[in-house]
């Protein structure tokens, strides 16, 4: 796409006219009193740029001014980054190598793809009266195609070669990257302090060619990420200053490499409450490299509360923790660390945290561990009276519905509401909102603060239960709600009169006898039923009653415990 920028030079249009204190930044002229002469011009793309053939100076923009006028540029920015330029007869020229480096940095990629660069600048024009004014313009789009990647980007097989494996440049090197698809290759290994390494494509391994390795940009390069386009003849290797269990990633689409602490798929609390798998941390069940934050809610210990976070791999087959694997735990930086947030270390001196329950009293504590940044937080949790269900049926947050706390010891909430099926066109599912207005998504029974919309699978009326202690939820379908009792004319309390869901509540219009009744779900006394005060129905409550026989309209609003009621007209 080629986007042009047109402007008119006028005091009241695209820029402000200069006053008597104005000194132009591009040319030493100032405006004179009177009405400026209006002129027009344009700033446009000089055309698409092919990085494969671009060399020396390349044309970026064309500046066009009417006869007798001139356009000047003070600064040029590409994707918000300043770039050097020359203005030659109204054409902005930039260095091809500088532009390529800017694109590489801007997108953190060397992918051989076409990108729409956003070019802006500070421009000015001098009109025929000699009046100079700055011009405010919209960005210009310039298409840029990066040069193709080297052949080693598509070889399909890669190895880690370094101190760890005795610099084994052969096909029997066990440290081979796994092909994850879409140009991504990964390897997880234990690396020692100060180890050196490089990456080898298949061609270099088969030929034993050390000059074919991917090399570092400088000697002793110790960053944990970078590009793979460095000069292989330098012989420079990468350096891992601090050892650990790391996942290395080669991205052969963007031609980058990186390594991060290996993040296991599951972690558990071990401490004063026990050293088994009773208290799992969850990240929503997704790839840990996508969401490295694991959370759990644990109960108070009622005394000395120490703990660590243990990885799945460190447990015995019977589910008990193997203390010989303590070096793989997430541990505190100081002995009996009492901090409620901060940094943690894998192993280290194997220190534990100590929650000061007297200073931070609560029934529960929310643990959050980010295994990418190695940051943690411990938050006292005292459950609010309500959380909220929000979805398409509630117009999301605008009509959010209350879910009541029904088990304060375990953080369990429930409510009874309609949920629309997801079609990703007009309906998108549902989420929960806590008392502080924070949104929670998830899926497959798991609640996640960073999760997407949840899908019920099928539209319908549900008992929605959320466990705020372990961040799980359950949906119990309610296919029917009926009136049962001698008010239906059946003194045996067997016959159900079904209510109909009208989009807002459950409703029945018809004859009822004088007598008692209750509401029950799915025609089942062993399931869900309501009774008691019409203005505050209770689960498993007492019988409701009708004083006189007649034709009635009865409407049931299940809502949540403490908010359920019915009307009888």
Image: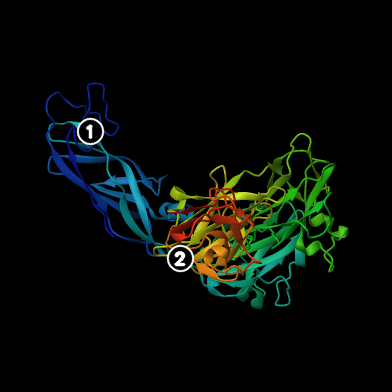
Q: Quadrant of the C terminus?
A: bottom left
Is 496 on the left-hand or right-hand side of 236? left
Q: Picture quarter containing residue 18? A: top left
List x then y, in percent, for residue 483.
54, 64
User: Which residue position holds label 2?
Assistant: 500
Question: Mark 2, mark 1: which one is toward the viewer?
Answer: 2
Mark sitting earlier along the chain (2/1): 1
User: Viewed as shown, does residue 82 lie left or right of 340?
Assistant: left
Image coords of residue 344 (percent x, y): 73, 46
332 lies above or below 442:
above
User: Is residue 216 positioned above or below 524 on the image?
Assistant: above
65 or 261, nearer to the observer: 261
Corner quadrant of residue 385? top right
Q: Which mark is residue 433?
A: none
Image quarter in which the N terminus is found: bottom left
Camera-side residue of 562 and 457: 562
Of helix, strand and loop, which one carries label 2? Answer: strand
Secondary element at tag 1: strand
Considering only vertical position in the picture, is 20 above or below 537? above
Residue at which label 1 appears: 133
The reply to whether residue 271 is visible in this rendering is yes
The residue sitting at 37% across, 54% down in the picture is 117
Q: Residues within 10 Å of mark 1 (few under 14, many from 20)?
A: many
| 27 and 438: which is toward the camera | 438
How is the model colour-coded? rainbow
Image position, residue 506 (x, y; %): 47, 61
Name, please, the residue furthest toward the right: 324
């Amino acid at each position: 796409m080629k986007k042009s920028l047109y402007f008119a030079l006028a005091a009241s249009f695209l820029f402000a006219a200069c006053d008597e204190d104005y000194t132009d930044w591009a040319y030493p002229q100032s405006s004179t009193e009177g009405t400026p002469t209006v002129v027009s011009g344009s700033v446009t793309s000089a055309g698409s740029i092919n990085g494969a053939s671009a060399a020396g100076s390349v044309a970026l923009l064309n500046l066009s001014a009417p006869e007798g006028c001139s356009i000047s540029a003070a600064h040029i920015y590409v994707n918000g980054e300043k770039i050097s330029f020359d203005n030659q007869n109204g054409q902005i020229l930039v260095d091809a190598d500088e532009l390529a480096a800017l694109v590489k940095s801007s997108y953190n990629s060397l992918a051989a793809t076409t990108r729409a660069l956003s070019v802006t600048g500070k421009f000015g024009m001098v009109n025929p009266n000699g009046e100079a004014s700055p011009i405010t313009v919209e960005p210009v789009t310039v298409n840029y195609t990066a040069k193709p990647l080297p052949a080693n980007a598509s070889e399909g097989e890669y190895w880690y070669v370094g101190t760890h494996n005795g610099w084994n440049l052969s096909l029997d090197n066990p440290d081979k990257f796994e092909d994850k698809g879409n140009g991504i290759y990964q390897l997880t290994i234990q690396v020692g302090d100060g180890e050196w390494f490089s990456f080898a494509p298949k061609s270099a391994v088969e030929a034993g060619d050390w000059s074919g390795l991917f090399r570092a940009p400088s000697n002793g390069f110790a960053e944990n990420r970078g590009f793979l386009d460095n000069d292989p003849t330098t012989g420079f290797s990468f350096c891992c200053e601090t050892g650990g269990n790391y996942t290395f990633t080669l991205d052969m689409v963007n031609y980058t490499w990186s390594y991060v602490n290996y993040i296991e798929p599951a972690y558990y609390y071990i401490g004063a409450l026990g050293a088994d798998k009773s208290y799992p941390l969850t990240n929503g069940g997704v790839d840990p490299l996508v969401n490295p934050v694991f959370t759990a809610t644990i109960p108070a210990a009622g005394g000395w509360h120490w703990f660590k976070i243990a990885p799945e791999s460190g447990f015995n087959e019977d589910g008990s923790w193997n203390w010989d694997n303590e070096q793989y735990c997430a541990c505190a930086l100081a002995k009996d660390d009492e901090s409620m947030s901060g940094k943690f270390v894998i192993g280290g001196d194997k220190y534990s945290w100590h929650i000061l329950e007297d200073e931070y009293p609560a029934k529960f504590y929310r643990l959050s561990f980010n295994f990418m940044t190695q940051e943690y937080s411990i938050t006292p949790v005292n459950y609010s009276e309500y959380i909220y269900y929000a979805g398409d049926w509630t117009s999301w947050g605008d009509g959010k519905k209350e879910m009541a706390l029904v088990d304060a010891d375990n953080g369990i909430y429930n409510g009874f509401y309609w949920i629309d099926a997801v079609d990703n066109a007009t309906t998108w599912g549902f989420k929960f909102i806590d008392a502080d207005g924070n949104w929670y998504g998830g899926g497959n029974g798991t609640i996640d603060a960073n999760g997407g919309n949840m899908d019920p699978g099928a539209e319908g009326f549900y008992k929605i239960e959320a466990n705020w202690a372990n961040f799980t939820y359950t949906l119990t379908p309610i296919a029917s709600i009926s009136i049962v009792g001698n008010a239906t004319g059946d003194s045996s309390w067997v016959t159900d009169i079904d209510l109909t869901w009208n989009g807002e509540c459950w409703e029945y219009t018809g004859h009822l006898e004088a007598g008692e009744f209750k509401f029950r779900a799915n025609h089942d006394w062993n399931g869900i039923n309501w009774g008691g005060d019409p203005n505050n129905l209770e689960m498993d409550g007492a019988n409701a009653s009708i004083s006189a026989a007649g034709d009635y309209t009865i409407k049931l609003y299940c809502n949540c415990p403490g908010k359920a009621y019915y009307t009888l007209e």
